[in-house]
Every structure is written in structure tokens, then in C-alpha cells.
Image (spheres, coloured by chain):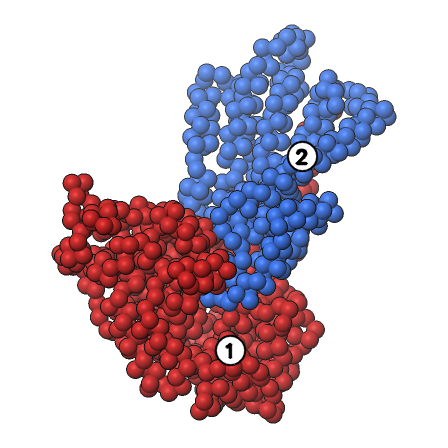
Chain colours: A blue, B red
Amino acid sequence: MSRSTWQRHISGDSLTGLWVYVIKRLILAVPTIIGAATLIFFLVRVLPGDPVHLLAGEQTSPEVIARLRAEFGLDKPIYEQYLLYLRSVFMLDFGISYRTYTPVIVEIMSRFPNTLILTASSMAIAIAIGLSLGVLASLRVGGIVDRAILVFTSIYVSMPVFWLGLILIYIFSINLRILPAGGIGSPAHLVLPSLALSHTPLSYIARITRSSMIEAFSQDHFRFAIARGIPRRNAILNHALRNSMINIVTVIGYFTGVLLGGAVVTETVFAWPGVGRLLIESIAARDYIMVQGIVIFITIVFVLVNLVVDIIYRLIDPRVRL
Amino acid sequence: MVSFRRTLGLIIVLIIIAGIVSYITILQRMPGQEVGRVASPTQLTGMVTYTTPYITYTSPRAPPTPYTSKEELRVAIGTDLDTLDPHDQTTNLVENVIMHVCDRLFDRDVNGNLVPMLATGLDISSDGLVYTIYLRKNVRFHNGEILTADTVKLNFDRIFNASAKKRLSAYLPNIQSYRVVNESVFEIRLSRPFAPFALSLSLVYIIAREAIERYSDQVPRDPGALICTGPFIIVEWIKGTRVVLERFNGYWGGFIPLKRIIFYIIPEESTREAMLLAGDVDLVFWPSLASLQRLNQTQGVKVIQYPTYRYVMLHFNLDYPAFQDKRVRQALNYAIDKEAIVSKIFYNTATLVKSPWQIGMFGYKDIGYYKYDPEKARQLLSEAGFTLGPDGVLTHTVYGKLSIKMVHMKGRFPGDVELAQAIQGYLRNIGISVELVTGDWPWYINTIYSSPSDKAKNGYYLFQRSWGPSVPDPYYTVFFLYSCKMWVGPDGMAHEGVNLTSAGRNIGYYCNREFENLLDQYIVEPSPSKRQGLADAMARILWDDAPAVFLFQLNIFVAAKSNLEDLVFVPGEQIYLAKAYFR
């Protein structure tokens, strides 16, 4: 893509079109969020367990039970609770946690940077290694390197993250003693959870890159580029890889969304205080308000990530119309 | 081509920027933590059982000898605090942290007797209605305030606030009024005598006037608002990550060896163990049962345990006709090999109990033992009219087949699922068919406190239970679990003519009038010796009547660096660390 083409796609009329598209998508996200909010409101209430009994403790009095029920609004009819909840969602007020007496949004935002950094570093590892392995395998189709990469990615993606996490801890923390086993606080703390969390996206990216590249190699434009005498390296990078990027970005976007929603197992194994752990802790405590808030937050993140992916499609491939 | 490269570059730059921004955010909030080192695990060490009597506040201590200069203790715990409010919390984990920051009116010794803390004395009037509390003088709060009876009154006002009664109020029943007598004397008047009240005073944490008047609503979540008199101050609480305590140099109770305690929140037990082995922490709560032996054999690490008040038992639902026959209930007590379970499933981290209430409680005495005797169990069932059917399951001409569902929890305490499976096997051995119904804690609580009709509809007639009272008086076990007044169900519902209460905890609908009369007398009897007699009589009735299969008390167990000394175990499942030091 020439410089003028690039400018055409991100400026002028096209830029206005992009903003219109973004606004349209954001408006369309509203029913999605309301749908998710409604679903989670009723789902958490279907779960067996009464938050009041859990919070009051076993040795309690009827007065304390009544106070907590009234405080959380759980003494109101379910339809009234639902309407109040919808109103607060519209006002972007996620409420106060039953368990911690802290605004839900404050709790989420105290954890989200941790999730963001873990996602960023895991995806950086997955993209860097996955892309390289995928391209390498596609250049040696059927060869020993290709087979080795296929076997490696198959085994790697099949490893349960819980098991992989413990193995990493065993090797790097207990035996070699070069990295901390869990917690947060220094760059070293990020290494093991990022490695563990990157294993699935890395394998998928490697495999999708390989198959997309193989397909691109058989396309006329690539053959023509080679016939034109364009250096092979340039042809691979700018013709084959570029044309494969739509598929690869789709996978990257999907996993980014998933990881931003919280990686419960990895966060638990490595004591990483992210959104996923907060969600699980809140479900265990039947902290309805917190669970609802987190689910809505994750929905919004997913919608935004998908939107970004669509915009990236457009930047990668000018034929894509938004 | 240029634009494609730019696009790719843009994606990578965005990822890097997002990473850097979040990382900087985290770094600003969290100072770095060093990766520690420990010696390699080669040498065996023996299992250490602590028997140290716990917290006593007699006189300032001198520094222990030998004593190293290491003043920071790093502890890995499994769950984050949900609140900091000492008046409105119910979990042992919260108390594990709060007890280092705030002091209570009284403490308890290892036998469950009151010992001085912020109060130095207690007078109880002969009619058992007036409690006069004498406060320690010259005790300073973290903000420099002096402890007075006025402050204590403010705390009681906060606990019993009419519009927002704190959870602690449930432990302080029957209070009619309270008043300040003078600067260091506080008086409480009860509406009716209630003998366990004195021990309940050992739960009353005192926070500063400033904390109540200026920050009352912030106490649950703002460490700065938690102004107390304890040996440490919370200087940092990062949700889901850690709680940092620093020594309060104006502490009234004497020398504190540690300057700083950091509680790291590490939910996964294997990670906690790995952190100890890697040297990232010095002490871990609740390592996995399966790892205890390995940890105990690791050089530089020791495993320590101490009995708690948590009693594990099986409750009979007496709505099931067969369980109304005492012989059947006794048979189940004989059918289960408790010693084998303690040894094989709990790796000796449980203590057999020979009384309806816990070792360490007022009035505890060994009064009997349902020693494993499957033959006796079969004999009792035979006397009750059961015969073995062709399918190997006992049947009765009136009650039908002895085939029941047992409700049990998963993830509440280590070994809970394995315990249920073992019980299923032991009962099958004598011809009782048991179907296990498993759920997480919220489901379990919801199920056992459901209405009698729901339990009957689902066939839930046997319940695995763990009960850990906060106050070491048998009242807090036997009243809640076996009193006719504590039959549980939705408020307003009646069962066999008895009104149920949602705060009731008698899930099996056991009711014995003779026991109930003794309990009524026990509750109001001020004389300790007479209460002891009544306690003995209650224990004998319950033990013989067997409203539950009495199993064992759980121990709290931790793994620690072997040079960490003076951990003080509190039977309420806490460990007091203010005396700890590194040898």
C-alpha cells in the first residue's frame, strides 16, 4: 500500500465514514450490553446460595440477617430489583459490593490494569513467537522443521494451563530459583504467568499463520511478485504475510478479548490479582452486584476489542468496507 | 508495502504502550519484591506440635534470645480480606489480620478462660445481670488517643446502632443498657442472666473515638480509618495482592520483635508451598494435606499444627423415621473408623473428640468414645429391626430400605470430599446405602438451611457439618446445633408445631426436653462449678442420644521456615504473630 493509499484510508471522507461506523457500532452495543446484563442478573439468582447467609456467618441473629437483606435490597421483589439494577446500569453505576462495601467499579479498576498488563505481555509473546513459528513452518512445509513446529504446537496447546503453570513454577522458582512463584510487584513476577497464559494463543497463531501463508503462496499475486523479481523475503513479508493477516488478526483479536476478560486459572495459580480472580471470588461469595458489574465490564471490553479488530481489518486490507 | 508495515508496527506499538502504561501503574502502587533463596531440601525434621498457651499480656517482654535482625515476616494466606471492620466481620481470615491491629476487651487462655487485654478486670453481679469492666490505664491508640470508658461506650453504640446492627451484636445478646461509670470503668446491664456473656466480651474489639466519629463508614475498607491499640498498623492494603502491617512503637503490651508483617494473598495452595520453598515467603497458611509430609522433610521448613474449635460431624435429620431410633444413630457412630480417617485422610491434622463439644471449651471432659466396632453397629441395627436385603442393603418392615442421601460440602476444609467418600464406604460396609450429594459452600449452606419439606422432598437426611464457634463456651455449639429453639427454616414457617427461624442452626430438628431444661439452667447459672455440673449432664445426654456422628476437631496447620519462632496459635483458627521472631 503506497503512502497516498494509506492517507486515503485514514483521512478525509473515509475517516468520517470510520467515525460513523464506530458510533454506529457503539450504539448497536447497547442492546448487547443490556442483554448480557439481563442474562447475568437472572443467572446469578438461579445459582443456589444466599449471599446474606454467607455474609452473616453461621452464628448470627435474625436482626442481622434482616439488616443485611434490607441493605442489599434483597428484601424487594425480584422485578423491582431488576428494574433498579437496569436503571443503575444505564447510569453506569455498578453499585456497591455486598462483600467489600466498595463501589464495584473501583474494585474492577483496581484489578483491570493487572489483567491488561498480563494480556499485553502474553499476547506479545504469543504474537512474536507464534508468527515466527508459523512463517517458518510455512516456508518448510513437510520438512522436519514444519513437522517439529506442528508437533510442538499440538502438544503445547494441549497442556492444561494449571499443569503448565505448576511445572513452570517447579522449574524456574523451586529448582532454578530465578523467578518468583507467584504474586505481583516486579517485572520478574510477570514472566511465568505470561508464559503460561500465552501457550494457547501462541499455538493457534502459529497454526493459523502457517495455513494462511501456505494458501497465500499458491495465490497468483504472490507468484506474480516472485516472477516480477521482487526479492523473496520482501514477497513473503509484504505479499504473503500481509494477505494472511486478516485471519491472524481475527485470532489475535479473539484471544485478546478472552484474556482481557480475565484468565481465572492462570491468575489463581500465579496469585495474579486480575479481573478473572475477582469474578471467581465474587461468584463464590454470591456477591451478585460484583458479578453483574464484572460481566457487564467484560462485555464492554469484548465489544471494544471486536471494534478495534474490525478497524484493523480495514487498515490491513483496503478492500474491507466498514 | 509501507502502510502494511505501519499497520503491523501500529499493532505492536499499541500493545507495548498498553503494557508500559499498565505496568507503570502497577509499579507505582507496588514496591518491588525480591526473589528469595532457601537451602536445598535434604535433611529431615520432625513434626512440631505447638502447645504454647496463647496471648497473654502480663508485662512488657524483653527481646528474645538468640534473636536475629530480620524484622520482616512474609506470610502467604489463601483469601483476601473482605472487610477491615472488626465489629462487622465473621471470618477467621479477617480476624487473623485484624487481631494484630486492634485489641479486644479481654483475651482467652488456652483453656478458654478470660484473661486481661484492654480490660484488666471484670465483676459480675450475684444476679448475673450487671457486668462491670475495669479498663487498663494509659493505653494509647495509634493516633495518640487514650483509652477511656467513653470510647468503649462509643464502640457499643456503633455495634448496636439501631439502623445498622453490626454482625458482632449477634454474640452479645440480652443487653438492656450500658453506661460509663467513670473514666476507666464501664458497666453493662443484661435484661436476663446469660452466663456465656463474659466470654463473648473477648470478641469485642475497641476502635478509637476518631475512627468512629470521623471515619465510621470507611472503617470496612480504609486501613487509615482503622485506628486501634494493637501492636501493628495497616499501612497498605492492595486488594487481592497483599496487606502490609508495620509495628506501632507506642504499643502498650511491650516489645514486638517484628517491624513489618506482609500478608500475601495466594489462593492456590501449591503456589503457597512453592513460594515457601523458593524463599518468597516465610510462613504459609493451609498447605495441602498431601504435601505435609514432603514439607516436613524439607530442610529449613517445619510444619506446625494446633487444634481449633472446628468440630466435624454428621448430622442426622430426624425427619427420617429410621433416625428417630437412637440405636440407629448410635450404630452409625460405631460404624465409622475415626482413627483411620484422621490418620489416612487427614494425615493426623485432626484431633479425636470424646464429647459433644470441643476440646478447649468450658466444661470439656472426655465422656466416652464410639470406638470403631462394625459388629456392634450391625447388632444395634438388628435390634432396631433391620435385616439385610438381597442387595446387601438393610431394610425394615416399617422404615423400608436404609438408603439415604448425604449432603456434604466441597472446598470448605482440606479433605472434606475424601471424608464424605470414606463415610460412604464405612456405612456401605454395614449395609447402609449412601448417595453423596456434593456442592460448594454457598449451595451447601442454602441446602442445609432450607425448609424441612425441601429436605424431605430431596431425600436429604444426613449432613456433613463443620462447626467452628468463636466463643469457647459449649453454649455456642450445643444451643445452636441441638436446641429445639434453633430449628431452622424460612421465618414464619412452623414444623411439628415449632416456629422455625432463618437464624436457626439445628438442621436435623433434634429436640430433647431433658437436655433443653439443663441448657436453660446452664445459660443463666452464674456459678462456674454449678455450670460445670450442668455441662457434664448435658454432655452425657447428647453423647448417649447421638444426634450426630461425632467425628473430630480440625487442626490449623502451617508450614514455616524452621528458624521462625514463637508463633502463637489461637484455637479460633488464627495465629498471633506479634511475638514471632527469627532465630
Residue B179 locus on image (x, y percent):
60, 86
Nearest to viewer (mark 1 / mark 2): 1
Residue A310, numbered circle: none
In the picture, measured across the screen, residue B198 lies left or right of residue B211, that is left
Kind of residue at disc 1? Asn
Does the residue at mark 1 contact the one at mark 2 (Cβ under 8 Å)?
Answer: no
Residue B241 locus on image (x, y percent):
55, 56
Task: Look at mark 2 in the image and give the residue it sits on.
Answer: A32
Task: Look at mark 1 in the image and give the residue it sits on.
Answer: B174
Tell me how many marks there are: 2
Image height check: is B208 above or below B481? below
- Residue at 62% over, 17% down: A240
Which quarter of the rendering shows the C terminus of chain B?
A: bottom left
Regarding mark 2 in the picture, which secondary structure is present there?
Answer: helix
Nearer to me, B154 or B492: B492
What chain does badge 2 belong to? Answer: A
Nearer to me, B322 or A299: B322
For the question of whether residue B112 can be seen, the reply is: no
Regarding mark 1 in the picture, which secondary structure is present there?
Answer: loop
Kind of residue at disc 2? Thr
- Residue at 66% over, 70% down: B216
Distance between the Cα atoms at labels 1 and 2? 53 Å
Hey, which quadrant is residue B297 in on the image? bottom left
